[in-house]
Amino acid sequence: MMVLEIVGGRKNANPIVESSSKDYFPHWIYECVAQGSDIQTWDVTVETKGIVRKMAIVGLWCIQILPENRPSMSVVVEMLEKSLDELEMPPKPVLSSPQHSMILSLNSSSG
């Protein structure tokens, strides 16, 4: 998550958000990368934009909810050594705020 905060230029400061995915930081990053939008608000070079996109994709892989979807550190290194075109987009992050986690826990314990 820290890498996503660095490339996004802001903190994931509000973990309890409304149901709007645009407010959930990983969704915002994911949408920027998927749509080819700029992630940063400051002026950068074309090369830097590629690095930021690569870091965002790797960061999104690393925060996957299912452990089997998260890469090992050796795979992360391999991903960082690849070109941007060789990287696959990860699945869209699932909303994972404390409020959402509590609801999931209550639903699973009542069933």
Image (cartoon, rainbow, N blue to C red):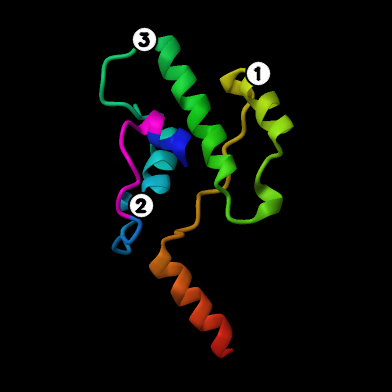
Residue at image mark 2: 24
Label 1 near label 2: C-beta < 8 Å? no
Q: Which residue is mark 3?
A: 45
The span shown in magenta is 6-14
Cα–Cα span, label 2 and label 1: 29 Å
| Residue 56, x across and y down, in percent | 48, 32
Q: Which residue is mark 1?
A: 81
Dot 3: within a 10 Å radius of its alpha carbon, few (fewer than 14), some, or many (20 or more) residues?
few
- The kind of residue tagged 2 is Tyr
Magenta region includes residue 27 = no
Q: How many neighbours does mark 1 have within 10 angstroms: few (below 14), some (14-19), or many (20 or more)?
A: few
Q: Earlier in the sequence, mark 1 or mark 3?
A: 3
Give, as a three-letter code, the residue at label 1. Glu
Image location (x, y in percent) of residue 31: 40, 41
Under mark 3, the amino acid is Thr
Which mark sits nearer the N-terminus, 2 or 1?
2
Determine the CA span between mark 1 and mark 3. 20 Å
Q: Quadrant of the C terminus?
A: bottom right
Please, is residue 51 above or below residue 74 in the view? above
